[in-house]
Image: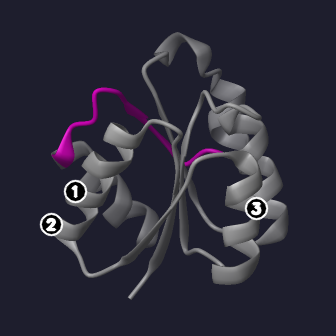
Amino acid sequence: MATILYVEDHPPAQLLMKAIINEMTTHALYAANSGAEARTITLAQHPDLYIIDLDLPDTDGISLAAELRKLHLAPVLLVSAYAESVKESDMSANILAYLAKPLDPDDVEIAVRRALA
């Protein structure tokens, strides 16, 4: 069973991701509302996968991805409604894949399975 950390400050988006992950697997899903909370969960749980929203209240998702990967190395999926904000260099450096909002359950499942393979 893999451990997934989803960093998202919008409660409805958290609920949707929980439903998608619960439907597809028995993976443990932890949700963080901020970068600070994500750091704490990372140190305690050592996630196998990070799913991080681009726009967080205390940091941006790309910077947070780099920080979390220094604490515990794991693949990162970036989630955002702002596709134009993601640069190719960010994708190759820290981000395995990008998921556009609104989230499509099939796209999430494919990305999660690839990331954990």
> Tag 2: residue type?
Glu
Check the image and tell me how it is coloured.
Answer: one colour
The reply, left or right, for residue 62 in relation to residue 84 is right
Disc 1 versus disc 2: distance between alpha carbons? 5 Å
Q: Residue at x 59, y 61 (%)?
A: 75
> Tag 3: residue type?
Arg
Residue 73: x, y in percent?
72, 70
Mark nearer the N terminus (1 vs 3):
1
Q: Quadrant of the C terminus?
A: bottom left
Residue 57's place in the image compared with 105, above or below, is: above
Front-most of 108 and 37?
Answer: 37
Residue 84's place in the image compared with 55, above or below, is: above
Circle on res. 39 = 3
Asked which quadrant contains residue 24, the reply is: bottom left
Q: Which residues are magenta?
A: 95-105
Front-most of 87 and 105?
Answer: 105
User: Please, what secondary structure does the residue beneath circle 1 have?
Assistant: helix
96 drawn magenta = yes
Q: Is residue 117 visible?
A: no
Front-most of 8 and 100?
Answer: 8
- Say which residue label 1 marks: 20
> Tag 1: residue type?
Ile
The reply, left or right, for residue 75 in relation to residue 60 is left
- Say which residue label 2 marks: 23
> Looking at the image, do the residues carrying marks 1 and 3 touch, with CB atoms under 8 Å apart?
no
